[in-house]
Image (cartoon, grey):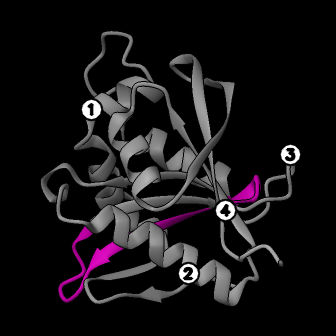
Amino acid sequence: MGIEIVTERLRIRPAEADDLPALHGVLASNPWYLELTEGSGGEVGRYDLSAFQRDWQVASVTGREVLGAYLRPGGEAVGLLDLMRENPRDGCPWIGLAVVHRDRQRMGLGQEMVEALIQYGKGHLGWKRARLGVIVGNEAGARLATALGFKAMDRVTRRFPAGLREVVVYERRLVDRPG
């Protein structure tokens, strides 16, 4: 079942092949993030559209969903989310990526798209909690997690194309504990 979410300013839906050039533009507008995750090896444009298309295809066979966030009205691609509904490591839903186009940052769109996804998961998918990881050094990601009520719970090392990175694991409980 594909996720379809509409907020006051956004429409969030599964990315399709025709969406990939615009969604790659969202990522490419954040070169510091691509350097952190993909590395550049000194090459401008190393993480190009074909690499993004490959990652989109891999996501579909590894239990992940790539979601685009589009402005309403008009449909401009402004955000990108990567979701794993149930991580095999811990059984929790994970938001693996939440990025907003550089030109649209600091407008609350990141909070809006992540909160909308969390509320959708809670209401339609029965989520009791959600997790996300923020690479150490991604201060904007850490601020977003905290602003959305996530609490740091662990620190792990993960391999990215750019090499090993320390990742802070955040969790947000979506239901109150009884008693």
The part of the image, by quadrant, that contains residue 39 is top left
Q: Name the residue under label 2.
A: 119
Residue at (47% x, 86% y) in the render: 5
Mark toward the start of the polypeptide (2 vs 1): 1
Residue at (23% x, 86% y) in the render: 72
Return the mark for residue 89: 3
Check disc 3 and give the amino acid type.
Arg
Q: Is residue 70 left or right of residue 116?
A: left
* Foreground pick, 63 / 179: 179
**Residue 19 screen position, x and y as percent:** 38, 67
Residue at (46% x, 27% y) in the render: 38
Q: Does residue 136 show up?
A: yes
Mark toward the start of the polypeptide (3 vs 4): 3
The part of the image, by quadrant, that contains residue 73 is bottom left
Return the mark for residue 130: 4
Q: Name the residue under label 1.
A: 31
**Residue 150 screen position, x and y as percent:** 55, 55
How far apart are the alpha carbons under marks 2 and 1?
A: 30 Å
How far apart are the alpha carbons under marks 3 and 4?
A: 13 Å
Check disc 4 and give the amino acid type.
Ala
Pick the quarter of the image with the N terminus: bottom right
Tag 3 secondary structure: loop
Tag 1 secondary structure: helix
How far apart are the alpha carbons under marks 1 and 4?
A: 27 Å
**Residue 82 screen position, x and y as percent:** 55, 57
Check disc 1 and give the amino acid type.
Pro
**Residue 59 screen position, x and y as percent:** 65, 53
Is disc 2 surrounded by few (<14), some (14 to 19) or many (20+) residues within 10 Å? some
Q: In this view, does 11 lie to the left or right of 119?
A: left
Tag 4 secondary structure: strand
